[in-house]
Amino acid sequence: MLVPGKPIKLTKWIHGRACVVRVQVDAIVPDADPSQTYLEPAVVKWLDELQGLADTGSVDALAKVGDVYVRRSA
């Protein structure tokens, strides 16, 4: 843990053109400023990777890490 504080879980939504994925990530509520949450660099990098998968519509890969919602036409 890079920042001292209370560890929590956050829900993050990653939006792509054809799908949305909901994932749980580890975050920290810093002792110094409990009004903010802190994501460690590895978590931010992972979220960026998921954004790339969502942008390309890689539903199968996203389904391995979270709940995927696919846009369907009526």
Image: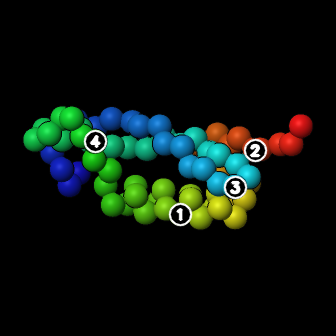
Q: Earlier in the sequence, mark 3 or mark 1?
A: 3
**What type is the residue that disc 2 sits on?**
Val
The quadrant of the rendering that contains the C terminus is top right
Cα–Cα gap, marks 4 and 3? 27 Å
Residue drawn 20% across and 55% down? 2
Height in image: 54 above or below 9? below
> Mark 3 = which residue?
17
In this view, the residue farthest toward the right is: 74
Q: Earlier in the sequence, mark 2 or mark 3?
A: 3
- In percent of width and height, residue 18 lies at 74, 52
**What type is the residue that disc 1 sits on?**
Glu
- In percent of width and height, residue 21 lies at 62, 45
Residue drawn 64% across and 39% down? 67
> Mark 1 = which residue?
49
Numbered label attached to residue 37:
4
Q: Are discs 4 and 3 less than 8 Å apart at CB?
A: no
